[in-house]
């Protein structure tokens, strides 16, 4: 769906500052491509090509000499956790997305060439590639080597197939590179949809299940896996809406947690991503709703007033980072266009100019929305 065609020139100019996009891409030109083999995780049971991370809310045990086993402090992020592989992935994703956006705007091959360098380094080169699985993600030292909920760590990869498609016809994108990238996502999609950790995440009751669906949908779309795309649509309609959303548009499973505002926004953002990725003229998820009215429009209508005025939030404040919100979450932009809502678009443009802290960046899957619209 070519959403830019649905926007006026004034809206496009307000929502997407081309000078800023080019500045970000020019910075990426000077950035050394990151990869997982740069950083060895001290607790990892995997090899140098295996992605590793720690569970966010797990801390060294104060009652043992070696700090093991780690203990949970729900909602409180441990700043000492190993996050280097996450940072490498996010840096790669952001640079590739910005470079792809700049290439689309200028058709300058230097941007596509650098994007391909990032992609080949992270996914394909034998010395530096990441293996297509997440066996060791969100591990808990002294407790487990990895967990199904760690699959949420690759949510940031959903920008990457979109970026690849934007530079697909560039001279720098050789056929073997394009096919190799597609095969990596074929392999990763197979892993998250067949491995016990992937199945566990798929069936998770809160935003983790939603985020599994976002990834599966995007990777299936990129690899032309129509069967998986159909499954993702089915789960959106028959699992996430009826089981997670209340009739008032809230997500009770998120409201019970230590960061109800953050998680509510996060869930809506990713439900919107599902609608954007999977909607077709024949099956428009933007318009779909259950018999009692539950649908994505209801969810956006509920949460958006608290984006305009966070002080009106009726539930308890998040245990961390509440004062840094609201953030420029892409659901405002996507929903603003899908529903023709100028207020959503205006809020997006205002928040996009606001500094975004690391917690915000960590919880926003799409960093360069321009490539999703062009």
Image (tube, rainbow, N blue to C red):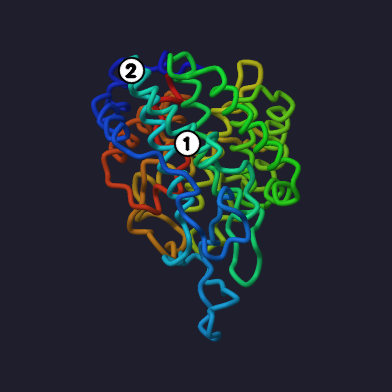
Height in image: 230 above or below 241? above
Q: Is residue 267 left or right of residue 100?
A: right
Which residue is depicted at the point 66% across and 42% down? 240
Name the residue beneath numbered marker 2.
105
Quarter of the rendering occupied by the C terminus: top left
Numbered label attached to residue 9: none
Q: Residue furthest front?
A: 127
Q: In this view, does 197 lie to the left or right of 280?
A: right
- Residue 287 pos. (x, y %): 59, 26
Height in image: 231 above or below 362? above
Q: How crowded is mark 2: few (under 14 residues within 10 Å), some or many (20 or more)?
A: some
N-terminal-most mark, 1 or 2: 2
- Residue 174 pos. (x, y %): 50, 18
Which residue is depicted at the point 66% across and 16% down? 282
- Residue 180 pos. (x, y %): 59, 27
- Residue 265 pos. (x, y %): 47, 47
Element under label 1?
A: helix
Q: Nearer the viewer, residue 56 or 2?
A: 56
Element under label 2?
A: helix
Q: Which of the 4 image quarters holds residue 219?
A: top right
Height in image: 292 above or below 58? above
Q: How crowded is mark 1: few (under 14 residues within 10 Å), some or many (20 or more)?
A: many
Q: Which of the 4 image quarters holds residue 271?
A: top right
Name the residue beneath numbered marker 1.
121
Q: Which of the 4 image quarters holds residue 285?
A: top right
Which residue is depicted at the point 51% across and 75% down? 60
Q: Nearer the viewer, residue 322 or 71?
A: 71
- Using the numbered discs, state the Cα–Cα distance from disc 1 to disc 2 in whole angstroms: 24 Å
Q: Which of 45 and 368 is in front in this view?
A: 45
Contact? badges 1 and 2 (CB < 8 Å): no
């Amino acid at each position: 769906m070519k959403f830019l065609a649905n926007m006026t020139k004034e809206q496009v100019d307000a929502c997407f500052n081309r000078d800023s996009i080019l500045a970000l891409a020019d910075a990426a030109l000077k950035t050394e491509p990151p990869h997982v083999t740069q950083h060895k995780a001290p607790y990892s049971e995997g090899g140098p090509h295996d992605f590793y991370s720690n569970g966010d809310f797990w801390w060294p045990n104060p009652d043992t000499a070696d700090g093991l086993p780690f203990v949970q402090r729900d909602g409180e992020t441990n700043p000492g956790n190993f996050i280097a592989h996450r940072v490498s992935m996010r840096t790669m994703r952001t640079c590739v997305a910005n470079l792809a956006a700049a290439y689309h705007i200028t058709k300058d091959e230097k941007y596509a060439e650098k994007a391909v360098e990032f992609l080949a380094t992270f996914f394909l080169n034998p010395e530096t590639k990441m293996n297509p699985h997440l066996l060791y993600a969100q591990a808990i030292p002294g407790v487990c080597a990895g967990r199904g909920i760690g699959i949420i760590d690759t949510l940031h990869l959903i920008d990457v197939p979109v970026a690849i498609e934007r530079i697909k016809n560039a001279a720098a994108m050789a056929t073997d590179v394009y096919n190799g990238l597609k095969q990596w996502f074929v392999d990763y999609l197979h892993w998250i949809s067949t491995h016990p950790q992937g199945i566990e995440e798929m069936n998770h009751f809160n935003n983790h299940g939603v985020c599994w669906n976002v990834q599966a949908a995007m990777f299936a779309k990129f690899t032309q896996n129509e069967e998986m795309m159909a499954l993702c649509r089915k789960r959106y309609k028959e699992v996430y809406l009826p089981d997670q959303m209340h009739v008032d548009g809230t997500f009770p499973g998120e409201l019970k947690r230590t960061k109800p505002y953050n998680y509510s926004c996060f869930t809506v953002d990713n439900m919107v991503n599902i609608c954007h990725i999977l909607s077709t003229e024949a099956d428009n998820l933007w318009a779909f709703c259950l018999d009692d009215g539950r649908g994505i429009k209801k969810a956006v209508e509920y949460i958006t007033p608290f984006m305009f005025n966070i002080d009106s939030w009726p539930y308890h404040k998040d245990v961390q980072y509440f004062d840094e919100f609201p953030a420029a979450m892409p659901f405002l932009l996507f929903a603003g266009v899908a529903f023709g809502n100028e207020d959503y678009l205006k809020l997006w443009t205002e928040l996009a100019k606001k500094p975004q802290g690391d917690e915000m960046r960590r919880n926003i899957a799409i960093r360069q929305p321009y490539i999703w619209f062009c």
